[in-house]
Amino acid sequence: MPHSASYGPTLPTSQAISALRPLPAHAVRLSADGLLGGWQDRNAAATLPHCIGQLHVRGNLDNFRRVTGDFDGGFAGYWFADTDVYKTLEAALWELARSGGSSAFVTDTAQLLEKAQDSDGYLNSYFQVDHRDRQWAELPSSHEMYNAGHLIQAAVAAARTAQHEPAAQQILAVARRFADLLIERFGPDGVDALDGHPEIETALVELYRVTGHRPYLDLAARFVELRGHGLLGPDNRFRQHHYYQDHRPVRDAAEVTGHVVRQVYLAAGAVDVAVETGDTALLSATERLWESAMSAKTYVTGGQGSRHRDEAFGDPYELPADRAYAETCAAIGSFHWAWRLLLATGRSRYADEMERLLYNGIAASTALHGTAFFYSNPLQVRTGHEADEDAPGQRLPWYSCACCPPNLARLMASLHTYTATGGPDGLQLHLYAPGTVTAGEHTVDVTTAYPWNENVTITVTETTEAPWTLTLRLPAWCTDVQLTLNGSQVDVTARHEGYFDLTRTWRPGDRVELVLPMPPRLVTAHHRVDAVRGSVALTRGPLVYCLEQADLADDLADVVFEDLELDTRSPIDVVHGAHAIAPVTLRTPVRVRSGSDDRLYRTFETTTPSATAPAAIPAVPYFLWANRSAGAMRVWIPFPPQER
Amino acid sequence: MPHSASYGPTLPTSQAISALRPLPAHAVRLSADGLLGGWQDRNAAATLPHCIGQLHVRGNLDNFRRVTGDFDGGFAGYWFADTDVYKTLEAALWELARSGGSSAFVTDTAQLLEKAQDSDGYLNSYFQVDHRDRQWAELPSSHEMYNAGHLIQAAVAAARTAQHEPAAQQILAVARRFADLLIERFGPDGVDALDGHPEIETALVELYRVTGHRPYLDLAARFVELRGHGLLGPDNRFRQHHYYQDHRPVRDAAEVTGHVVRQVYLAAGAVDVAVETGDTALLSATERLWESAMSAKTYVTGGQGSRHRDEAFGDPYELPADRAYAETCAAIGSFHWAWRLLLATGRSRYADEMERLLYNGIAASTALHGTAFFYSNPLQVRTGHEADEDAPGQRLPWYSCACCPPNLARLMASLHTYTATGGPDGLQLHLYAPGTVTAGEHTVDVTTAYPWNENVTITVTETTEAPWTLTLRLPAWCTDVQLTLNGSQVDVTARHEGYFDLTRTWRPGDRVELVLPMPPRLVTAHHRVDAVRGSVALTRGPLVYCLEQADLADDLADVVFEDLELDTRSPIDVVHGAHAIAPVTLRTPVRVRSGSDDRLYRTFETTTPSATAPAAIPAVPYFLWANRSAGAMRVWIPFPPQER
């Protein structure tokens, strides 16, 4: 384990294409009074223990005990239920490194996995007991390598956080045995085959990074190259090649397609392969794919997945607010993908997207108390919503397919590692949150109430005599950044890729004040987005806002935005601390449509809409919706009636 | 078989609640030069033979031969594949009665079914061979009584069209044996159970109607009453009670929910039960349910089903154009439901809905040549549409779940029986089509090019000396009906339930001229329909129109309607015979949006849309779309840009 001890997820080797370098995990400390640090503490105190408890209650751990002969009940849950254990294990490992605590779950699980593993390295509690005959026989749907991928990622966390602990060594050994089996079966001397659900690609590259064992990287590269040649689909569930991203090779694909989580996991793995193999064409292809998602297949919250059916992207500009699938795991996967592209290229658009996801598409999934979750994250819910199992009107403690909660847990436990990068020559701040960041021998203290407040203060607390560069991301949503250094205005015109560099010989106490003015903004979608035509979304800084029925006497379905002449009238007030659940609300002027004509369709001439007098109602950050009561919500607010 | 020989589907007994009486099947002859009669002939010449051929090719008939030991291959298709045989058989029987031809398919199938039936009456080729152990064990999903229902409906067709033929007697005997088994198992002395997919209810009532055997009616009533008490769902596919319409008793349900085909089939069966048992409360409940569908859950084409997932209704006002499921079978079921309510109540709104469905939601499913079909009928398809198996961008010859084509065949073969009602005292015309209609001793000749042309001429050709009433439906879409009798203007103000009565002593040669002016109209949706906000649909008479990429050089996604000041400028021209595939097209003035800002989201202030000069492009009837080439299509056309 030469390179990566004490780091977080994703650590390119020194040979990799890499514009930015991750910092060691302990180099960033997020303060609990900031939103991000608060989320990390909530995760440690609530979400992670909740996940561990659910693994016990739901039978995921007993599934392994069936393999070892220590439990004689039936198999519980989906055939890929092992991944919930692996993701929780990974989360627990990151969290132990971040904040300490009991390692009992890690120790017990490590022993259980070692005991359950077959002598040849195979490990899958579904196939090992009841379905030996189907082992390796149904790769498009079996998730066997997807399972293996999450096992490996837990092992990578073990290696990076606790390499000298016996439990960590046990987990890494189990994962390596399984990975070695994969090389034997599916490597250059094995069969050409693919798992229907990517994850193994990025996991194998990370395993290569912690072990230095090149065949892991080669197998990941082989899986990326094999995709796009029709090994997967169409199948008896009518899934076409594009559902599996197997219609075109990754390096030739023009746009993101099919099952969203599979697409973004695959793309993240392709970036990992590209940077480690120096494959600039493949790296460009992943940037092109990302651009295709951003230009026509992503919600204003960063969420992705327009179709419940197949949990899929859908057509360009197909972005319904009500039937947004926007799976939590898709947002997490998209975050991972963007992070890898940020490291590779140093372009701020990827950090902008990470920020959008974090404060909207990802954050919305978790209840304030941290133990209930959305699986899908629609941008509109109507009164009396007829719920699917995975699209309820309020957050649920768990799901039969519980991929999202442990995925959130592992992201949150490692969140600090995504906020900054750097090395001896500089320190790059990507996500603004109160805390401290150290790069090399230089440390800064960050004070801010971001994203509620526009001010970010960065104070140098430790530094050498040599000059170094403090790099600040200037978010694309901010049009008039102001910056002072020790009270003097700094011209921020000269930027590179959305970043601004301050290079100097720093002294302790040097103080940088970044102001990111965040007036409320009305956002409109491309004219091809049919689903939200004639509507605007309300944003402030990186936050998307929404209206909730809880703030209304009338039905939210009848609310229209009062007036679009914002630039002259500025009718939206920013209210700090006025709302019980949201630190900053916006007072939004609306009217309520009324009228007795309830016909579903009518000739245009006879339309005579009327509306009440304008009134101001609170808009709350989207990520905080449904924390008071289940009820209607909408992000996109219709224009005033335009009909005669 | 006392009452119903020589009638079509749905013949209430003389004791039933019934405002209108069906005419014998031979009393209506639709002319082949009209649209409806032309469809009937196309069905006989193309669709029905195509369905029979597919049953051979796809293995549906061999499935029965597996039961009889005459075929030793595997089971083919879905577990409810028998229904395709039954529906095709029903279609063949209606068609034999209408136009004659070979009865070989009927004779062979009757023998096959009789031979395959178990001695106790059970018949289901899926469960009889491979799954005996699961027989009756999985009613929520097994479709066993759904299968039985379609067998019974074929038997009803046999009894009504060929009661003296041995094959018809054979089919009826098979169906009765199965129905008797159902009574034994699920009747008052049996278990409380329901099939997850309704159909058996309406079938049993019809079987009662042809046999006079009351227990069939009682079992149907029992099934209707049992629903709503949680016998079905939630299940391991996460289907809730409401998916199965089992969340509330039919007579208490406030709105249509869940799987659309199941809902409308159940509702049709409930009407049948209500009218035969004199249950006015149940009848009112079905009217209330119908109203809930019409007021918030039905497309402008009459299609229903807003979600691919679960093939379901969704929330009120959730009516996406692109992801409209609008299954062909749902439209057919809705047509059947409306027909039953029309017979029971005599209210024209039900006939209006039948007309809307027929010319739009149903007709669109079938290609001009009659041998390719849509399973789902979206109101918008984008360029490069990423297709689901059952939502392709063009019609397919068959589907793995092929419920729709044979369902179309049986509707089209009996279509003439839905166009008029009557008896000795009068004749009611509901759907206008060229042909002849006889009620009692009175015959009229109808001449019209409807729906292409507004004129309908009705000439009395046979009559008695006694006065009788000619009743004409005045469609709700028509605001200025004109009527003349032998050249003299008739005041049509005095209507009842949307109908106008002409009562007199008629003479041969008496001539009624009905004019239903059909200027192009722009239709807008209720302001709660988010999916089509800021858009209009173009209609003319009963037809909904659409724009197709085939008529455009620019991308359809960028087209906006030129101007909404229709009443003063009337810019839409009606063009007869100008289009290769559509007898009447509309010349629609549009602009094409342009501009280099392709960002998916942007602040409202910076929006500077621009558009080309207006141009006129053809709009074609929705039901004729995709007959030239697969490509983009849309019913709802955006308004001109409103942003600054």
Image (tube, coloured by chain):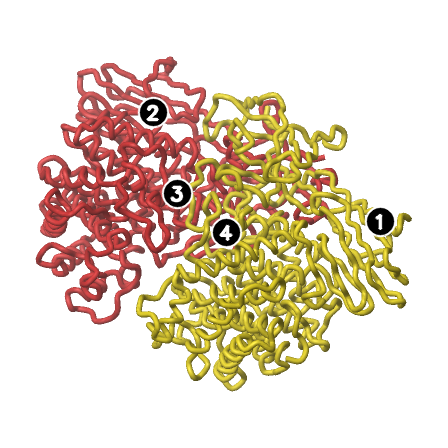
Chain colours: A yellow, B red
Residues at marks 4 and 3 on the same chain: no
Callout 1: residue from which chain? A
Q: CA distance from mark 4 to mark 3?
A: 50 Å
Query: Would you name the residue on which mark 1 appears?
Result: A483
Q: Which residue is mark 4?
A: A371
Residue under circle 2?
B473
Report if residue B585 is visible in the image.
no
Q: Position of residue A617 (x, y in %)?
A: 61, 30
Whichever of labels 1 and 4 marks the residue nearer the N terminus, that label is 4
**Which residue, as the protein is rendered here, is positioned at the far bottom?**
A189
Q: Chain of mark 3?
A: B
Disc with the residue nearer the chain's start (2 vs 3):
3
Residue type indicated by callout 2? Arg
Crowd rating for badge 4 (residues with CA inside 10 Å; few <14, some 14–19, many 20+): many
Q: In what element is the residue under mark 2? A: strand
Tell me how far mark 4 sits from mark 2, CA to CA: 60 Å
Q: Please state, as top left, top right, bottom left or bottom right, where the C terminus of chain B lies in the image.
A: top right
Residue type, label 3: Ala
Q: Are marks 4 and 2 in contact (CB under 8 Å)?
A: no
Q: Nearer the viewer, residue A463 or A213?
A: A463
Mark whose residue sits in front, 4 or 3: 4
Q: Is disc 3 placed on a helix, strand or loop?
A: helix
Residue B39 location in percent, x, y?
A: 34, 43
User: Given this view, does label 1 or label 4 mark the residue nearer the observer?
Assistant: 4
Seen from the viewer's position, the closer of residues A75 and A70 is A70
Name the residue at 66% across, 45% down. Answer: A543
Mark 1 surroundings within 10 Å by alpha-carbon count, few (fewer than 14), some (14 through 19), many (20 or more): many
